[in-house]
Image (cartoon, rainbow, N blue to C red):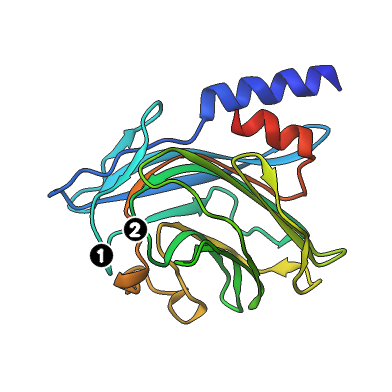
């Protein structure tokens, strides 16, 4: 188990999510989803950027994603190296962000052709909405300081249907969402919501007023519920 932990630490050090969004230049950042099989199943994300006017990849390791403005087209998406991700029996998503937005905005969106599978949305009244397979739970008391870095982790398990948030290391109450395994090939978008109706489109239109504006980094995705100790290790 110690060897596994060290291997995970090495993977996080080498593949820690980051990226860059260049204003005035139409960039689309594409993140490749890699499944690493150790004693624990884990999904880690590697970020590369593709300029929309050409197919040249750029390694953005060691940087962060900058979302400079609202948009109904600009987005960051993840594409799987594996042909099909068959199912997600559970999910843990962790990320760090900074924003000056006080209105609703999307942080993370995972969609299949059948359902809005997993969504994290910051609400304007100090609430964060977690959506799993079109079932939602709203977590109150999630206020945070604008223009400061914050960490957010979200967990959900199909076995129990329970979801939970960790904002800046503080656990929320657990709330019930649907207890169904997420199935089908997944598409993941950061900072925008990709709904199931635009799943097949490479030129999806997003809802401009829900755009995340700010900085985003240290994105981690697992296909199981990460322990509280591991969450604390990830966010610090």
Count every numbered label the image shows and give the total: 2
The residue at 40%/26% (across/down) is 62
Residue 8 appears at what percent x and percent y? 69, 26
Confirm whether residue 155 shows in the render: yes
Image quarter in which the C terminus is found = top right
Residue at the extreme bottom of the image, as rendered = 197
Relative placement, left or right, of 21 versus 97 is left
| Among the 4 quarters of the image, the one containing residue 207 | bottom left
Q: Is 83 on the left-hand or right-hand side of 29? A: right
Expressed as whole percent of the image width and height from the top left, the position of residue 32 reads 49, 45
Residue wearing tag 2: 75
Tags 2 and 1 in contact by the CB under 8 Å rule?
yes
Q: Disc 2 and disc 1: Cα gap in Å?
A: 8 Å
Which residue position holds label 1? 71
User: Outermost residue toward the left?
Assistant: 24
Where in the figure is residue 180, as x and y percent of width and height? 79, 72
Relative vertical location of residue 99 with respect to residue 75 in this rendering, above or below: above
For the N terminus, give its image quadrant.
Answer: top right
160 or 54: nearer the viewer: 160
Determine whether, in the image, residue 93 is placed left or right of residue 212.
right
Within 10 Å of disc 1 (Cα), the crowding (few <14, some 14-19, many 20+) is: some
Label 2 sits on a secondary structure element that is loop
94 horizontally vs 233: left or right: left
Whole-percent x and y of residue 127? Answer: 55, 64
């Amino acid at each position: 188990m110690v060897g596994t932990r060290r291997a995970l630490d090495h993977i996080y050090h080498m593949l820690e999510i980051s990226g860059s969004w260049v204003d005035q230049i139409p960039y689309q950042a594409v993140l490749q989803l890699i499944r690493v099989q150790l004693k624990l199943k884990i999904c880690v994300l590697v970020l590369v950027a593709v300029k929309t006017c050409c197919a040249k990849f750029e390694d953005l390791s060691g940087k962060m994603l900058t979302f400079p403005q609202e948009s109904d087209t600009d987005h960051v998406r993840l594409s799987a190296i594996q042909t099909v991700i068959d199912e997600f029996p559970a999910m843990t998503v962790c990320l760090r962000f900074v924003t000056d937005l006080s209105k609703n905005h999307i942080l993370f969106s995972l969609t299949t052709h059948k359902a809005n599978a997993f969504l994290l949305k910051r609400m304007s009244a100090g609430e964060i909405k977690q959506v799993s397979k079109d079932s939602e739970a709203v977590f109150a008391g999630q206020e945070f300081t604008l223009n400061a870095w914050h960490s957010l982790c979200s967990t959900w398990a199909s076995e129990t249907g329970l979801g939970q948030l960790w904002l800046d290391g503080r656990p929320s109450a657990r709330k019930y969402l649907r207890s169904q395994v997420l199935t089908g090939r997944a598409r993941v978008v950061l900072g925008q919501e990709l709904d199931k109706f635009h799943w097949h489109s490479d030129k999806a239109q997003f809802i401009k007023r829900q755009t995340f504006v700010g900085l985003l980094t240290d994105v981690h995705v697992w296909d199981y519920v990460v322990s509280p100790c591991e969450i604390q290790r990830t966010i610090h």
